[in-house]
Image (tube, rainbow, N blue to C red):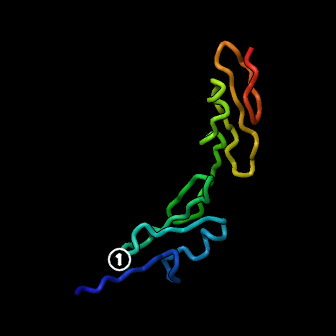
Amino acid sequence: GVAVCELDECAANCSTCAGDVCSAAGQGCRDTNASAVSLLDWECFCPAPQEGVVLRGAANCTLDECSGNTACADAGQACRDTDQRPSAVGDWECVCPPPSDSTATSGAAVCE
């Protein structure tokens, strides 16, 4: 058979490899095509539940606390997380539907 050469740019030590770029940022690394002729296609990705991925560099991770959060929807309200930095936790808001403009942080609002 024909030999298939592979190069995982996340694990190998080479001039086109990721090195510790991803791990130093607390992120994972994946080589989207491990073929030895497919170079510079590695990417860093954010740890769940954070989101973000970037080609050949550390990703800008975001954390949308409304994602998968049903507290607002269960109360018939919208969820808003305006600061999606991973360090900004517990700042999501439930927003009442019009004509009310009431909001509440980290839980359902009292709509008037």
Q: Position of residue 34 (x, y in %)?
A: 40, 74
Q: Give the total number of marks visible in the rendering.
A: 1
Mark 1 burial class by Cα count in 10 Å: few <14, some 14-19, many 20+: few
Q: Which quadrant holds the C terminus?
A: top right
Outermost residue to the left: 1
Side of 7 relative to 25 (left or right)? left
Q: Position of residue 111 (x, y in %)?
A: 73, 18
Outermost residue to the front: 74
Question: What residue is drawn where x is 76% and y is 21%?
Answer: 110
In the displayed structure, 46 sits above or below 5; it is above
Camera-side residue: 96 or 24?
A: 96
Task: Determine which quarter of the picture holds residue 1.
Answer: bottom left
Side of 62 relative to 39 (left or right)? right
Q: Position of residue 41 (x, y in %)?
A: 44, 67
Kindly identify which residue carries mark 1: 37
Side of 103 relative to 36 (left or right)? right
Camera-side residue: 38 or 81?
A: 81
In the displayed structure, 111 sits above or below 52; it is above
Question: What residue is drawn where x is 58% and y is 66%?
Answer: 28
Camera-side residue: 40 or 30?
A: 30
In the displayed structure, 29 sits above or below 5; it is above
Element on which disc 1 rests: loop
Three-letter code, disc 1: Val
Question: What residue is drawn where x is 65% and y is 48%?
Answer: 63
Q: Position of residue 85 (x, y in %)?
A: 69, 48
In the displayed structure, 76 sits above or below 107; it is above
